[in-house]
Amino acid sequence: MTLAPAPPYRSRHRSIRRGLTAALITAATVLLPVTAAGAAPTGTAVAAASPTLNELAAAKGRYFASATDNPELTDTSYTATLGSEFGQITPGNSMKWDTTEPQRGQFSFAKGDAVVSFAQAHGQDVRGHTLVWHSQLPGWVSALPASEVRAAMESHIAGEAGHYKGRIKAWDVVNEPFNDDGTYRTSPFYNAMGKDYIAYALQAAHAADPGAKLYINDYNTDGLGAKSDAMYNLVRDLKAQGVPIDGVGFQAHLAVQYGFPTQMQQNLQRFADLGVDVAVTELDVRMVLPADATKLAAQSDYYRRVTEACLGVSRCVGITIWDYTDKYSWVPGTFSGQGLACLWDANLQPKPVLDVVRTALGATGSGDTTAPSVPAGLTVTGTSSSSVSLSWTASTDSVGVTGYDIFRGGTQVGSSTGTSFTNSGLSASTSYSFTVRAKDAAGNVSAQSSPVTGATTAGSGGGGSLKVQYKNNDSAAGDNQIKPGLQLVNTGSGAVALSSVKIRYWFSGEAGSSNYSAWCDYAVVGCGSLSQSVSSSGSSTAGADHYLEVGFSSGSLAAGASSGEMQLRFAKSDWSNFSEADDYSRGTNTSFADAPKIGVYVNGTLVWGAAP
Ligand code: XIL
């Protein structure tokens, strides 16, 4: 038998629950910023995209919701989006038993009331979470003799669901009743009553608030499997017995390293076919940090597939994300070394994955109408007789900068995904004016940056103008040889005497011998007409303390002509290894491309490339 993958979510939250008691925020202090103004606070607020997630979901007959928690409600930038983007909220902690009835018979609803008041002030529904759960359960319940647990449970439900009667759209009456293998989880309730506690709890909740939709909620039941089979059988039996159950909640605490739940839509559908609603109740998609493109792509894929699974099942009533921002996500505090699980980042900015969800909900266009900031700090970092190299400071954007357009004299001459660019093919001894603008995925562009002037150098005379192209002939970046492929190209209108030309390839020598040997393995012009040697550069730039210099003994390069490939190779005399990845002139391209970080000198003057 193969072992099932590690569960996406283990029930470790009891021991690491957030210290709510330390944050003794009363309902009054929480509510002041909201009710005093009568509306969501403005100022630092992040504007909601239009249509909002909830508007998009509503157009499909669903809601889109977020969890929240009392400490966050004092953060007005946070509440601006919480109050505008979502149609429903779930208190992440404030309606749990340890908060609402910490001592037997002593109810405390201030925190839950604050969440309900926020929702009412913003026209939102509330999902009640949760009445009966083995976790975040006060010690007095666990200490009761079995004979008293049912009465305590029913009294808790009557007290809490009764307090919120008429104000809760749906209750997670029972939370997490199963183990991952589909057996019933032991808890004070199961130990006292067996599985019948679930029916008793649902009946008590129905008696306390007949208008609320009553749910059982669990994790790792999102896809087909032993645990969702157990839930399915339970719900089927409860329905057959006439127990008031309206829905099943699927937490969907997903992690990219555990894979996507098996056939989620089919799984939701089989529950719907039992005659209950289904809801995604606690969605987040975490990853092991640091993020990389593969993990982020998987996360986008998971969010899209969960959204599509819900939209594909007519009885899937909506999706709740387990808080909307990485700023307040439970993930980093619960799953060590993991995070970035939410749709907004820790600065409350929308992440690209938000657009993925919006699109899955049927948004046309990204809804992103915010342009990136104007690139600042545009400077000339190098010139040759035929090129000007530029760099600038990265722009910021509400979703993400996807690249930059570079203009010369008002005409676009190129694009870059990074913050540097070399414009080649220019005339010698000429001044050019450059500007840069930033763009995002939705096609929004910033204004042009302040211009910078770059003047090409005098060039090599005779109308010649040189550039060097490079390809990497060395698949191993950590071995004892470096193998640049070079070719010299005359882009000018006159011939260039090759004996005046030197090409420099900068690299770092690392530890080991400071004596080098260099070879020409092949050259179209003939290795016999080349010289090659390694020297110390004196440069303190990283990856540039040495250079290979290639020279020519004779010949000339006609206008428009190329030298053809020159295969160079060099090594230290002790044959110790290099660490090439950071070398100044190195590229990973294996076909020839212009090499702005390899220098071409004519009679000792740099005419191409930026020297370190
Ligand atoms: C989490 C809260 O988000 C945390 O703040 C708390 O420390 C632990 O509980 N499944 C549930 C939720 O049903 O109640 C849990 O919420 C997350 C997992």
Image (cartoon, helix red, strand yellow):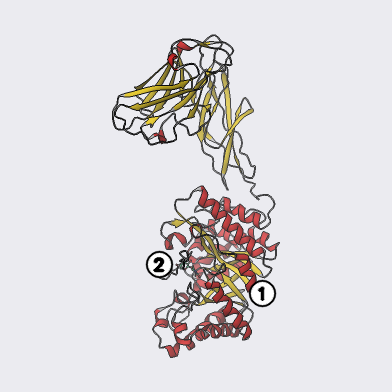
Residue 324 in view in this figure: yes
Mark 2 residue crowding within 10 angstroms, few (<14) / some (14–19) / many (20+): few
Residue at the (65%, 50%) spot, across then down: 366
The x and y percentages for residue 468 are 50, 22
Which residue does the image show at 61% across and 36% down from the upper left?
A: 447
Question: Which comes sooner in the sequence, label 1 or label 2?
Answer: 2
**Disc 1 target residue:** 273
Between the C-alphas of marks 1 and 2, the distance is 37 Å
Q: Closer to the camera, 323 or 254?
A: 254
In the rendered view, tell whether residue 512 sits above or below residue 528: below
Disc 2 marks which amino acid? Answer: Ile
- Look at mark 2 in the image and give the residue it sits on: 16
Residue depicted at x 64% and y 65% = 310
Residue 569 image point, x, y percent: 40, 26
- Quarter holding the C terminus is top left
Taking 470 as reference, is 320 left or right? right
